[in-house]
Amino acid sequence: MAPAPLEWPGRFDRPSTRGYHARLMTASTAPKTVDPALLARRDRRLSISIDMDGLERLSGLLAKGGGQVAVDLHFYVDSGRRTLISGAIRAQVTLICQRCLGPVVIDLAPNVHVAVIDCEEDADHLPEALDPLVCPAGELVLAHLVEDELILALPVIARHEDDPRCPPLTPDQPGGDGAKRDNPFAVLGALKKRPGDNDLD
């Protein structure tokens, strides 16, 4: 059975029986924190959009700001009575291509599958399939989770893939052919030493 959708119009401290998906929340209107244990006990699903400009750490890594992040998370309790969060985060970001140094649009689609724990020591007791998410006060800053997942999903080297309009600036850049080019200053030096230049001495 699909988890029930969730809408809490003001604070995330009480559920509403009226649920709908993809409610737009900007940095100024999104709730600061959620109670993951409460949501998990009630088997809730949270489906919202977040303004990407409100994610300051992520925005500082991008070539261009703006856009929305689609967040779809399911909070539930597993057979081991652990509070789990599973779902997906989707966003399009603009980075600088390390091949041509032009803008390149990258689709980020990290999947979330974490267990909420009180302290880092609890991570030793989790199965390998679960990533730990430390919430010492039992509260989760939703924007921090989303931002962390998107930053981890950024490519190590951003570049256009199979785009003939994206030639490498130098052969030693990613995608270069490795061919050795003449040094223009060496060519200039050779021209200055043309045969016969010393005949004037």
Image (spheres, rainbow, N blue to C red):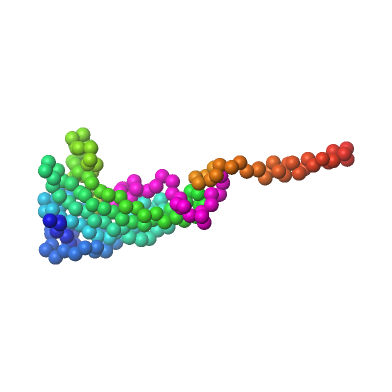
Left or right of residue 174: residue 54: left
Q: Is residue 22 in the magenta section?
A: no
The residue furthest right is: 200
In front of the other: 131 or 13 = 131
Q: Magenta stretch: residue 151 in it?
A: yes
Q: Quadrant of the C terminus?
A: top right
Residue numbers of the magenta segment: 143-171
Please determine whether, in this image, residue 44 is positioned above or below residue 195: below
Name the residue at 31% across, 48% down: 148
Q: Residue at x 31, y 55 (%)?
A: 90
Q: Is residue 95 visible?
A: yes
Main SS of the magenta segment?
loop
Q: Quadrant of the N terminus?
A: bottom left
Number of callouts:
0
In-front residue for pair 120/2: 2
Q: Residue at x 20, y 57 (%)?
A: 46
| Residue 149 location (% of width, % of height) | 30, 48
Quadrant in the picture for residue 106: bottom left
Residue 26 screen position, x and y as percent: 29, 61
Query: Is residue 143 in sight in this rendering?
Result: no
User: Which residue sits at x=16%, y=60%?
Assistant: 5
Whether residue 118 sits left or right of residue 106 in the image: it is left
Residue 101 appears at what percent x and percent y? 51, 52
Where residue 62 appears, x then y in whole percent? 41, 53
